[in-house]
Image (cartoon, rainbow, N blue to C red):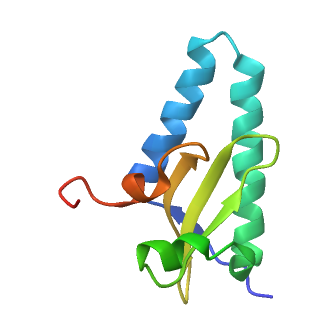
Amino acid sequence: MKVKPVIPRVLANRDVDEAIRHYLDHDAAPAALGLIDALEQAYAHISKHGATGSPRYAHELNLPGLRFWPLTRYPYLVFYIERDDHIDVWRVLHGQRDIPAWMHPPNEP
């Protein structure tokens, strides 16, 4: 098993920052710390087992190779593509969002 580095895109990092800010704004520092731990666990998992994520949205969005992995005990999904030499994390989105709308660049319908 080859461990690949996980490289989040700017939008993925922004998503994480917003999620943490949400918990902190609601005086839930332990939840914010738990989210960070859950994200680290998810990144560790997909770095070793990139093919285990669900390809559901790859078909729906016509984005070959797109997969997602849910965070444990948190309603967030890590969207990524496994590359030859790394894991390319596109977004970290709340599972209740309109995922197809959030995965398109702002200038696309």
Task: Return the residue nearer the eye: 57 or 13.
Answer: 57
Position of residue 5 relative to residue 2, above or below, is above
In this rendering, position of residue 101 left or right of residue 23: left
Position of residue 22 relative to residue 60, above or below, is above
- For the point 61% across and 73% down, the residue is 56
- For the point 43% across and 78% down, the residue is 63
Give how far across and how far down residue 40 sits, in percent. Answer: 72, 51
Give how far across and how far down residue 28 sits, in percent. Answer: 71, 16
Image mark count? 0
Q: Quadrant of residue 54?
A: bottom right
Q: Quadrant of residue 45?
A: bottom right
In this rendering, position of residue 17 left or right of residue 24: left
Give how far across and how far down residue 70 sits, in percent. Answer: 72, 56
- For the point 77% across and 21% down, the residue is 30
**Is residue 87 in view?**
no
Give how far across and how far down residue 26 sits, in percent. Answer: 62, 12
**Is residue 31 in view?**
yes
Q: Residue furthest top?
A: 27
* Screen quadrant of the C terminus: bottom left
* Screen quadrant of the N terminus: bottom right
In this rendering, position of residue 37 left or right of residue 96: right
